């Protein structure tokens, strides 16, 4: 059962995200969306390293798609219905095949607000069952309400949360047009419903937000201890290419997972020691040496919130 403190923290996180979105300076032009080839069958589009805004249509995350002889499988739906429409247009430049399946790596706003556009095409949506708790939560309602204000007109009163057609709770393998996909639940990590997707024939791993490249991760309410363990588990895949939830492709799995892992470990070590010593958060944050991470995009808008949430998490773990 969620405690009053947990509820308060969720509300604070939503409010802070809205404040940060308002404060973030944005480019005047909508960022281009271009499908880049990942492997023989797979493609991806890369979002910008920024917070969601009307200027970027909330195009701040990646999405991918796999073209098979029997249809297209999409991974994540992007952060607004308009972006989903643009993604479909990119798919149509490459193939006329129907979009048969969409796999959700996790139910954060920048990955799911485009779901209704794919649903209207008859696409079958697959996600981890742990997301159902979020979909029915006050947090999801408040997040959408805030997005309708902060991301208008791209997220508006017609934008809605969409449930999966198929909820899975364990590892699953399926094939479309002879192309095999392995679905591996890896939460609770970044979210309770994290799911990685692996294509063994082409050795491509779609890691969702377990892997952030070239920017500070958004930690939020993440279970950082399990997130670190999940990164170690992902290294067990025989992977040539990783498509992260944010940032460019990775061809060096261990090296490129290390940034996310090192950051999480550092947060837990520094904030854990402060919580153990009953040091007030403000003092702990000011005395922590952040120099190895402060050059990364979004450090100034995300790091303090990440540190605070980790401080509270480790206070809870200690009790």
Image (cartoon, rainbow, N blue to C red):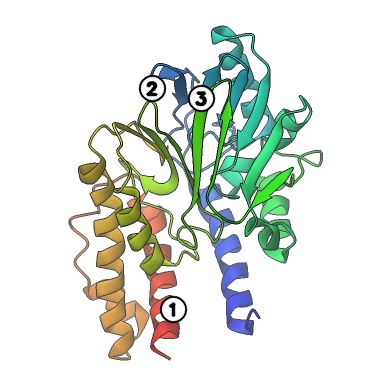
Earlier residue among tags 2 and 3? 2
Q: Are marks 2 and 3 in contact (CB under 8 Å)?
A: no
Q: Are marks 1 and 2 in contact (CB under 8 Å)?
A: no
| Residue, disc 2 | 38
Q: Is residue 20 above or below residue 222?
A: above
- Residue 99 on image: x %, y %: 66, 22
Disc 1 packing (10 Å; few <14; some 14–19; many ≥20)? some
SS at badge 3: strand
Q: Where on the picture, by quarter, is residue 139? A: bottom right
Q: Is residue 50 above or below residue 228?
A: above
Earlier residue among tags 1 and 2? 2
Q: Residue at x 49, y 59 (%)?
A: 187
SS at badge 1: helix
Q: Is residue 5 above or below residue 89?
A: below
Earlier residue among tags 3 and 1? 3
Specify the quadrant that holds the N terminus.
bottom right
- Residue 170 on image: x %, y %: 56, 55
Position of residue 201 in the picture relative to residue 75 (left or right): left
Q: Residue at x 65, y 42 (%)?
A: 126
Q: Are marks 3 and 1 in contact (CB under 8 Å)?
A: no
Mark 3 or mark 1, which is nearer to you? 3
- Residue 115 on image: x %, y %: 69, 36
- Residue 215 on image: x %, y %: 33, 45
Position of residue 263 in the picture relative to residue 67 (left or right): left
Residue 179 shows which numbered tag? 3
| Total labels drawn | 3
Residue 23 visible within the image = yes
Query: Marks 3 and 1, how far apart in space?
Result: 44 Å
Specify the quadrant that holds the C terminus.
bottom left
| Residue, disc 1 | 312
Position of residue 113 in the picture relative to residue 180 (left or right): right
């Amino acid at each position: 059962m969620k405690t009053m403190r947990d509820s308060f923290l969720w509300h604070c996180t939503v409010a802070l995200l809205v404040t940060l979105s308002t404060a973030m300076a944005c480019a005047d032009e909508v960022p281009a969306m271009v499908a880049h080839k990942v492997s023989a069958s797979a493609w991806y589009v890369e979002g910008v390293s920024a917070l969601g805004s009307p200027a970027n249509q909330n195009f701040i995350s990646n999405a991918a798609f796999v073209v098979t002889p029997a249809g297209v499988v999409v991974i994540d739906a992007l952060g607004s219905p308009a972006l989903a429409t643009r993604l479909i247009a990119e798919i149509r430049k490459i193939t006329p095949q129907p979009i048969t399946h969409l796999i959700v790596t996790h139910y954060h706003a920048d990955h799911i607000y485009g779901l209704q556009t794919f649903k209207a095409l008859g696409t079958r949506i697959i996600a981890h069952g742990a997301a159902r708790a979020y979909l029915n939560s006050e947090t999801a309602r408040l997040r959408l309400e805030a997005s309708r204000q902060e991301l208008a007109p791209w997220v508006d009163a017609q934008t809605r949360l969409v449930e999966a057609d198929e909820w899975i709770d364990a590892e699953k393998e399926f094939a479309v047009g002879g192309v095999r996909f392995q679905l591996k639940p890896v939460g609770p990590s970044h979210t309770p419903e994290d799911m990685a997707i692996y294509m063994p024939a082409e050795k491509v791993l779609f890691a969702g937000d377990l892997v952030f490249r070239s920017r500070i991760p958004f930690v939020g309410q993440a279970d950082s201890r399990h997130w670190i363990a999940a990164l170690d588990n992902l290294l067990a895949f025989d992977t040539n290419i990783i498509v992260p939830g944010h940032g460019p492709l990775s061809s060096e799995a261990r090296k490129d997972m290390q940034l996310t892992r090192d950051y999480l470990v550092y947060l837990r070590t520094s904030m854990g020691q402060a919580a153990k010593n009953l040091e007030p958060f403000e003092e702990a944050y000011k005395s922590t040496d952040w120099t190895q991470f402060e050059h990364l995009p979004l450090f100034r808008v995300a790091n303090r919130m990440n540190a605070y949430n980790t401080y509270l998490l480790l206070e809870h773990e200690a009790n």
